[in-house]
Amino acid sequence: MAKKQFKTESKKLLDMMINSIYTHKEIFLRELISNASDAVDKLYYRSLTDNGVILTRGDYEIRITPDKEARTLTIADNGCGMTREELENNLGTIAKSGSFDFKRTEGEQSEVDIIGQFGVGFYSAFMVSDRITVESRSWGADEAWRWVSEGVDGYVIEPCEKETNGTVITLHIKPDGDDEKYGEYLDEWRIEELVKKYSDYIRYPIRMLTSREQLKEGSKDEYETVTEDKTLNSMVPLWKKQQSEVTDEEYAAFYREKFFDWEAPAKVIRQKSEGTATFEALLFIPAHAPYNFYTKDYEKGLQLYSNGVMIMDKCKDLLPDYYSFVHGLVDSADLTLNISRETLQHDRQLRVIAKAVEKKITAELTKMLESEREKYEAFWRAFGMQLKYGVYADYGAHKDTLQDLLLFRSSNEGKYVTLAEYTERVKEGQNKIYYACGETAEKIARLPQVESVKSKGYEVLYLTDDIDEFAVKMLREYKDKQFSNVCTDALDIASDEEKETVKEENTKNEEILKFMKDSIGDAVKAVRFANTLGDHAVGLSTEGELSLEMERVLSKMPGNEQGAPKAQTVLEINLSHPIAAKVKELYVTDRDRLANYAKILWAQARLVSGMGVDDPAAYSDLVCNLMV
């Protein structure tokens, strides 16, 4: 029979479809299974309206048969089948979709979801095969037809023998090359893997005869081959079932299998939306952070399904970065897919879905915080840092969404508190939220300024992560109360009388303080007396927006080892400590000794504040010289 040419303008179009449209060659199996599912759907739809079709949903199946010896892979269905004319139109004309026509004329009024739209998925099979044979018999027809093609050179249509309705597609798999091992698509385990990955929720059973070796009964070393007709897909998606029908154990098993975690999720979130965007979501909050969560290798994203067929394994646009720890999936029939069904043509629908998913996650975390505090605190220890990054990112665009989910260690019994809890119990007239930064809560609690603030009856938040103060700076305030670092010149807890006393002492002893500052050098912006250090002799504070903690964090960033911004550091001397009287005395009697005292006090203040000493040997020599 004479070979026919494809009804496209040029062979270049088919070549592009075979070699350029699809990112991964493995997609071909998803496309052929989806086409088979569509064919079964069409016949099932006819059974609802045509008394001549007496099949029930349980009568349908899709069957996969690999043959390594013949090097063929067969995908067969018992759906509606195709006439000669339909073979000509659907396979002879590239980008002609029978599913699209059905959906346009009948499917939109039916309850049947048709997956295929573009009519190019079939040609993805040429990525892995050098010849395709299609044998099809339409429901109710007396004859069957065979379509054969080796690609861009055209195709042949001829009569064939086929006893039942449906379509059988046989791929002759390409020879293996140095770069491509096409033979893997004939391995049973690989076929099972791809069905589970992309087509697990096709509503009809996908079956394959599988074989395995097992010990013969009664034998210790003799094996036999056992054949099993295995259903490869789950068919009914977990998220399609009523919530009351799914147990916690089923959710946990699904989560472990799909997202490769050894532990059950901390929380399961179900979401169903109709209207602007119709979709269902099944989301999981892990009980612990993945080992690579805070590395560049971690990929965020939800699985994206269209009518139960997986389109993308990690659709990053469905999650904001601050919720990147969430696993799960979204299934929507409303998505406008591109021609390869691997990505979306328009992102408006995706943005609507993503916004709804974000609101749902926020609401569920809020509910957990309010009603399951212990569980939320465990979640916070695993992922709290990510939420704080979210507050700081994008110039604070998401701070209103996240601020009420934040937890901080508090000087109030060392427990976690929310900002709402802090502000509910502030002292009368208090207009600041006090905080301090350090390596651990225990070290922060020993800071001179923290002890002083606590002695006045104020609660202090302990910030221990590198991102903390940057996030707090981005928040600026909460419920009209500004954040205030107790280790800065902005600390304002003294009475008017105490302020006046300190001001007079600093003015009166200006020469002494300048001498001490010059003795220390450029590392310190100023030296002054203070009354906010409790029982400690000295402490450090800063002027301006850059604190010591922010300087430390910035200095660790790549490229900033030598050139990081420096905080304007102030050495504070406790006015009520005996050391204050001593420095005044030495300025009169022994200024050389006072110069050494200044350096020692500077080093001590750095140590008290959790910072290192730049020259430990020099510091040791100064202390020893004073001792002798």
Image (cartoon, grey):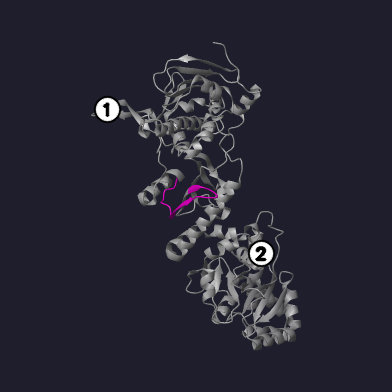
Nearer to us in this view, 49 or 262: 49
> Residue 232: which numbered mark, if any?
none
Q: Which residue is mark 1?
A: 216
Is 10 covered by the magenta stretch? no
| Label 1 packing within 10 angstroms: few (<14), some (14-19), many (20+) | few
Q: Which residue is mark 2?
A: 551
- Relative to 626, residue 305 above or below: above
Is residue 114 shown to the viewer in this render?
no
Marks 2 & 1, CB-CB < 8 Å contact: no
| Label 2 packing within 10 angstroms: few (<14), some (14-19), many (20+) | some
**Which quadrant of the view contains residue 341?**
top right
**Which quadrant of the view contains residue 18?**
top right
Secondary element at image label 2: helix
Q: Amino acid at mark 2?
A: Glu
Is residue 538 shown to the viewer in this render?
yes
Describe residue 106's horizontal placement relative to residue 479 as left or right. Answer: left
Q: Residue at x 63, y 63 (%)?
A: 470
- How many angstroms separate mark 2 from mark 1 (CA)? 71 Å
Q: Residue at x 47, y 40 (%)?
A: 308
Q: Which residues are magenta?
A: 260-280
Is 265 covered by the magenta stretch? yes
Residue 236 x %, y %: 40, 41
- Relative to 499, residue 126 above or below: above
Q: Quadrant of the C terminus?
A: bottom right
Q: Residue at x 40, y 38 (%)?
A: 235
Residue 571 x %, y %: 67, 75
Nearer to us in this view, 270 or 624: 270
Furthest residue to the top? Answer: 1
Secondary element at image label 1: loop
**Earlier-in-chain disc, 2 versus 1:** 1
Q: Amino acid at mark 1?
A: Lys
